[in-house]
Every structure is written in structure tokens, then in C-alpha cells.
Amino acid sequence: MAGIYYHIPFCKRICAYCDFYKSAELKYTDAALERMHAELEERKDYLSNEKIETLYFGGGTPSLLSTRQIAGLLAHTRECMDCSRVEEVTLEANPDDLTPRYLAELRQAGVNRLSIGIQSFDDECLKLMNRRHTAAEAERVVTEAQQAGFDNLTIDLIYGVPGFQGSRLEESLERAVALGVQHISAYHLTIEPDTAFGRRMARGNFAPVSEEVSEEEYLKVHHTLTRASFEHYEISNFALPGFRARHNAAYWHGRKYLGIGAGAHSYDGNERHWNVSSVKDYIAGAAPEAEQLTPHDKFNEYVMTRLRTCEGIDLHQMAALFGEEHARMTLKNAARFTAAGIMRQNEHKLFIPPEKFLLSDAVIAELFE
């Protein structure tokens, strides 16, 4: 099984925290879409012999596209590839782009899962992050999406925002749960250099929360959502039973995927490919770059991606893929983490319990080859 990712990099407004490739030059939207259609034709054999299971519109702000443009990309994809087994078609959306009519047309176009970028239910926090919507608008569009027939909704939240700890975070979480969505992605704020927050921090006007606050907020998110019957199945992702994000699981479990659009990445099982992070150069036909993965690279990626999930590392699978010695050394190197309660072993599974996911980077670095 494999997935296709469409990167729509355009944004009306650049959020203060965002480090993804994006562009506010909306005048290039039509030309970029034309190039995406051409790329679909050029790379239609990239996932040869693979059944496509998931389609995902990410960004940027895919909800800036018209439903006609979205339907056009989906229809062209079905012409180029075997999409007979597609079960999940996700579109990332900003709340202020969603209207009842737009939602109804998305359903008609074949989108069956929405990922709504709410980030917070605190209006002051939204203003700080330079978001375009209010908390009330966010709640309204979730209800309207449900009324339009969307029964697989995920919302994004950001925690670890300086000045918005304690009861303010708790209120956002409670309002999120009360909406009756099936999936919540909760990300700790990371302050990257090439963002508004990063530039403010460089000037001494902004600072990340302390490690103690980070841990406190992480555990608040974990406990609040798991008490509400959400499964904490990946570092930043929580799902009600049966509603894990199938497309994202492809990344965590090493499956193949094709990325279409400026800045999009692809993986064919042996190489990674990525398109130029420039709308103008992409439109001009710049060829993707490529990186051949060595056995060493593949092993480290296996460790990194599997330990992001609640299932963790399957030592039998690791031995089959990389050899018994790798599995033996991994178990040996993990011993001090299992002794400290940071990792657990259950028969042939080696994993980090979700309440300890915040420590995963340190564990993963120690288990790298």
C-alpha cells in the first residue's frame, strides 16, 4: 500500500511559528496547479505495482483551492494510478476558509477526512500566532463540517506557548474534546530560526517555555485526551478507536509515498526524492533531487520512526530486515532505558510508553547505529 501527498504551499497569512515551505504569492496558484498535473503524468510510474490507499492535501493552506481544483487533482490521479483501494482522502483546512457550501462540495469531490488547523481555543493565543480565525469560528466550522457529513475529523492544537499554560491550555483541550472530533494532533511549539517567533527570540523578545513547563503541559495533554478515550498512538497524535491517521502511518511504518508539488517529498523504498522549495522554480520545471539510502540510513530511520509510535520496535521484524546482530545490539543498548522505566519490553516489542514520549529524541539518539 502507498500514499500520495499534494503540497499546496500557498497561504494568505504566514503564521508566527510555521517552518514548513510556504508562499504568500497567491498569483502563482494556477500555474503551480498546472505544473502539479504535469508532474502527476511524469511520475505516474513512481509507485508502480503499489495500490494507493491514501491521498492527502497538505500545506500551506489547501483550503485556499476551489473545490473544482481539488476535484481536478483527484480525478487526474485516478486516471494516472490505481486508486481503487483508496479509503482516506484528507484535506488540511483553515477554519476561516470553510463554509457550508464549500464543505458540501468537498464531500462531493471525494474528500472524506478534514484536518482543521485550529491550534488554540484562546483568542489571545491565536492572535499571538497570527492565525486568521477566532475560537468561536473554529467551533462553528467543526459543527458545520459534521452537519455536512464529515465523520472523520481531526483538529490541530499547539501547546508549550509562552504565557498560555495552566488553565488556558486546559480550557482549549476541554473545548476540543467537547466538539466530538475523532482525532486530535497536539504539537509542542518549536521555535525555529526562520519564523516570526524565531526572529523575536533572536531579538530577546520571546523565549520558549522551560523544560519543567514542557513536561507539565505534555502530561496535561496526554492525560486529558486519554481520559477522554483517545489513544495516544504517536508522539503528537491521539485518535478514538478506529480513527488513526492512515496516511501519516505510512511515514512512521516505512511505506512508499509520492509527493506532488513544490517542496513535496517522496520515498520509493530505496531513495528519497524532494521537489525544489520554490514555487517559481517548480513551475519552471526544476527536477527533483534524490538521496540513495544506505542500509545504515534505513536502520536509523526504522529506529526513529518506530519509536515515535506506541507499538515501537518489533525485534523480530528488525532482525528480518537488518540482521540478528542489529536486534541484539538494540536490545542491549536499550537496557538502561528499560531499567529506568523510559522504555518497556513486551515479548518481542520494544517501545516507549506514551507518557514518556517526550524523552523519545534522547532514546532514539542512543539507539542509532
Image: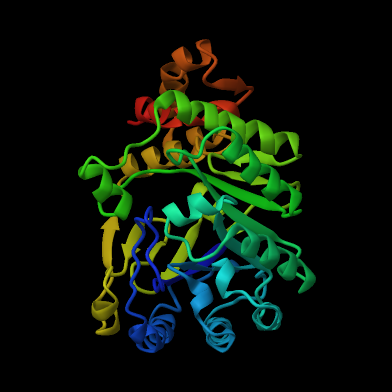
Q: Is residue 86 left or right of residue 266?
A: right
Does residue 60 appear in this view?
Answer: yes
As drawn, 213 above or below 148: above
Q: Residue 240 location in percent, x, y?
A: 73, 47
- Nearest to the observer: residue 367 or residue 62: 62
Q: Name the spot of residue 27 as percent of width and height, x first.
A: 34, 86
Say if 175 sits above or below 365 in the image.
Answer: below
95 or 49, nearer to the observer: 95
Q: Which residue is painted at 60% across and 31% down in the image?
A: 220
Q: Quadrant of residue 8?
A: bottom left
Residue lying at 50% horizontally and 73% vertically, measured from the top left? 62
Is residue 353 among what the camera can see? Answer: no
Assign the N terminus to one quadrant of the image: bottom right
Horizontal side of residue 352 vs 112, given as left or right? left
Q: Nearer the viewer, residue 175 or 226?
A: 175
Which residue is at the far front? 124
Residue at position x 24%, y 50% from top?
199
Image x and y of residue 165, in percent: 52, 35
Looking at the image, the residue that sits furthest to the top is 339
Whether residue 32 is situated above or below residue 327 in the rendered picture: below
Image quadrant where one finds the C terminus: top left
Q: Residue 304: horizontal and vertical position, in percent?
A: 43, 38
Q: Residue at x 57, y 61 (%)?
A: 134
The image quadrant that residue 94 belongs to is bottom right
Q: Is residue 128 above or below residue 260?
A: above
Q: Is residue 356 left or right of residue 36?
A: right
Q: Nearer the viewer, residue 127 or 287?
A: 127
